[in-house]
Amino acid sequence: MPYTGPFEDRLAIRELLEIYADAVTRCDAVSWGATWAQDAEWSLPDYPEIGTTKGREAIVGMWVEAMKAYPGIMFEAWPGSIEVDGTSAVMRSYTSEVYDQEGVTMRDRGVYEDTCVKLDGKWHFKSRSFRNIHRQHAAKGL
């Protein structure tokens, strides 16, 4: 089943994903960082030069530097599956990003395989692994 477990937890996990996406679009490192567990891992296997980053502090630091290359980004995310089991969950989510770089409009779409953990009554990302699905690059505005 793509959606299992208590409705309240599934809603809270969906809101976690929405907070994450909103923070990316606003380039808000504080809000974005708060979505991660302290001992989280973020893997980007399609970007071997980055690989896996461990720990909230390191993840946020890497993200702050990376975001300098994505001015004016519009980032959206939505779940395809949320499966809750007590205080842990797995989620598959999809992303769509639009941003401009050096006169080119980039449109990237991808998928995250996530694990989430409920700590002190609040859901956080424990691990996220991102893969590209589709990339489209065209002259700015096209």
Image (cartoon, rainbow, N blue to C red):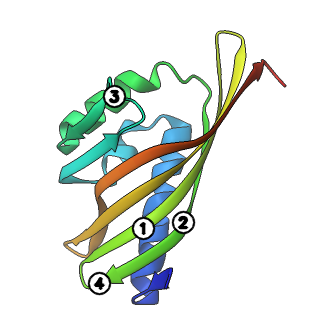
Q: Secondary structure at mark 1?
A: strand
Label 3 or label 1, whichever lies nearer to me, is 3
- In contact (CB < 8 Å): disc 2 and disc 4: no
Compare marks 3 and 1 and give the one earlier in the sequence: 3
What is the distance, in whole Å, between disc 4 and disc 1 at their CAs? 11 Å
Q: Which mark is residue 78?
A: none
At x 65% / y 9%, what residue is drawn?
102
Question: In the rendered structure, which amino acid carries the disc numbered 4?
Answer: Asp
**Which residue bears the numbered disc 4?**
85
Determine whether 106 is above or below 45 in the image: above
Location of residue 13 (image quadrant): bottom left
Q: Position of residue 59 (x, y in %)?
A: 26, 37
Q: CA distance from mark 3 to mark 1?
A: 23 Å
Q: Hey, what amino acid is under mark 3?
A: Pro
> Which label belongs to residue 79?
2
Q: Which mark is residue 48?
A: 3
Measure the alpha-carbon separation of dots 2 and 1.
7 Å
Please state which of residues 20 and 130 is positioned toward the viewer in this rendering: 130
Residue 129 location in percent, x, y? 36, 49
Report the side of 96 relative to 12 (left or right).
right
Which residue matches tag 1?
91
**Foreground: disc 3 or disc 4:** 3
Amino acid carrying label 2: it is Pro
Dot 2 or dot 1: first in sequence order is: 2
Mark toward the start of the polypeptide (3 vs 4): 3
Q: Earlier in the sequence, mark 2 or mark 4?
A: 2
Question: Marks 2 and 3, how far apart in space?
Answer: 25 Å
For the C terminus, which image quadrant?
A: top right
